[in-house]
Image (spheres, grey):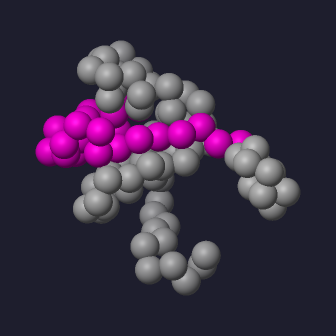
Amino acid sequence: GPRHSQKSSRPLLGYCHVVPRAELRALRHAVKTEVDPILVPIDCEWVVDNTQALLAGGSVAHLDHADLWRKLKEELDFRPPQWLAVRKVLTHATEEDVREGRY
């Protein structure tokens, strides 16, 4: 909610302001600031797929927004294996979707 102690809002830096960059930046922020292992729900399939590839040892150097991917990888290098998990969720889930497990 709006008063959650870990809610964060920051400008999206870089020359390109698109949804995948915003989702990737939010993921990096979560990885950078969380202490305990986390499961991050993400509605951008591109970020989910490439994060899972990164976690499996793949390279993301060839991807758009390489600056953020590099920073995310650097943060993950200091975390134990399986510390981060990501999950694809619906872009615009309703309360009913959540209740029914369709998120």
Q: Is residue 50 above or below residue 14?
A: above
Residue 1: horizontal and vertical position, in percent?
61, 75
Q: Find residue 5 and report its horizontal and vertical position in percent.
A: 44, 80
Query: Residues in magenta?
Result: 65-91
Say whether residue 75 is left or right of residue 2: left
Q: Nearer the viewer, residue 32 or 67?
A: 32
Residue 41, visible in the rendered structure = yes
Q: In the picture provided, is 48 more to the left or to the right than 2?
A: left
At 59% from the left edge and 31% from the top edge, which residue is drawn? 45
Residue at 35% x, 44% y: name it: 84
Residue 73 within the segment the image draws in magenta: yes
Q: Position of residue 76 (x, y in %)?
A: 23, 41
Residue drawn at x 14%, y 45% is 78
In this picture, is 71 found above or below 37?
A: above
Which of the 4 quarters of the picture holds residue 75? top left
Q: Nearer the viewer, residue 24 or 66?
A: 24
Q: Residue at x 50, y 33 (%)?
A: 47
